[in-house]
Image (cartoon, rainbow, N blue to C red):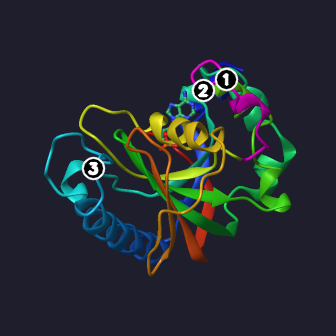
Amino acid sequence: RQLDEVCLPLFFGWFLLTPAQDQLRSTGSDFLTALDGFKKNAVGSSVNEGQEIPLEQYFKGKRSLHCTTKFCDYGKAEGAKEYAEKPEVSELYGSVFDLAVSALFVTPRTFGARVSLTDEQLVLWPADAEKEAESSVPGAGSLPLGSRAHITLGCADGVEPVQTGLDLLEILVLPEVEPVTDLELGSLRFYGEGRWMLELKEPMCAAACFSSFYK
Ligand code: ACK
């Protein structure tokens, strides 16, 4: 038992294969450039309030792109052991999945990609992932399972990546709004307080290996 606990990872998740990482980084970068261009002509909607630096510099990039399923904190997080012991987790460990990246979003804190999970992928999703966020994002607990699934692409200075999933939930609990414009990549929506979401015209297919991370 002692050994089991020591061996639990920091987190389980899908780790994007190199070509998918490259493609998503490049699409993400195109989005930031397009958003910077659009914001120049839009009033009162800046992401980085009062700062004129390009979004690409505002967000510090992540080295390895992944979609977290369960944050275990080496066994200290609630439900970590139960998750690690799920038969699906060991059965599917090391398998490669095609993740559908359906949207990109930015807030004053984070830059991320929304992942739309299939039923097959949802078996690896913790049942309480959205409920756990309820205290930070009221209403999150009532969203469909998998709503929090995301890939962190960047964080503003001093912001922890856990914020990306919370920012996504914060957008998803808001009432749907009309797009402000159609960009080449898809339709762009503005949710106030520097929150933007681009729904991709063509969801991106990202090959990713289900595994775990230890630092
Ligand atoms: O970008 P992410 O999903 O946000 O990937 C990292 C990963 O685990 C390693 O830090 C995520 N993470 C950190 N803390 C938590 C938490 N309390 N709940 C859910 N995910 C978390 C972070």
Q: Secondary structure at mark 2?
A: loop
Q: Secondary structure at mark 3?
A: loop
Which residue matches tag 2? 137
Q: Nearer the viewer, mark 3 or mark 2?
A: 2
Query: Which mark is first along the chain, 3 or 1?
Result: 3
- Decide if residue 157 is on the left or right side of residue 186: left
Q: Magenta region's main secondary structure?
A: loop
Gap in Å between the C-alphas at discs 2 and 1? 5 Å
Q: Please, what secondary structure does the residue beneath circle 1 have?
A: loop
User: Is residue 85 covered in magenta?
Assistant: no
Compared to residue 93, the image places residue 162 above or below, namely above
Structural crowding at the residue carrying mark 3, measured as other residues with C-alpha within 10 Å and reported as few (<14), some (14–19) or many (≥20)? many
Residue 203: x and y, percent?
61, 74
Q: Which residues are magenta?
A: 135-146
Q: Which is more toward the observer, 142 or 212? A: 142
Task: Give me the C-alpha separation between circle 3 and circle 2.
Answer: 22 Å
Q: Which residue is mark 1?
A: 134
Q: CA distance from mark 1 to mark 3?
A: 26 Å
- Horizontal and vertical percent for residue 62? 34, 52
Q: Nearer the viewer, residue 125 or 188?
A: 188
Q: Please report the residue visible at 68 percent of the width from the left and 20 percent of the height from the top.
A: 78
Residue 35 is marked as none
Query: What residue type is disc 1 on?
Result: Glu
Image quarter (top left, top right, bottom left or bottom right) of the N terminus = top right
Contact between labelled residues 1 and 2, with CB atoms less than 8 Å apart: yes
Residue at 29% x, 59% y: name it: 39
Q: What number is the disc on residue 59? A: 3
Residue 134: % across, % down: 67, 23
Contact check, label 1 and label 3, Cβ < 8 Å: no
> What amino acid does circle 3 point to?
Phe
Q: Quadrant of residue 70?
A: top right
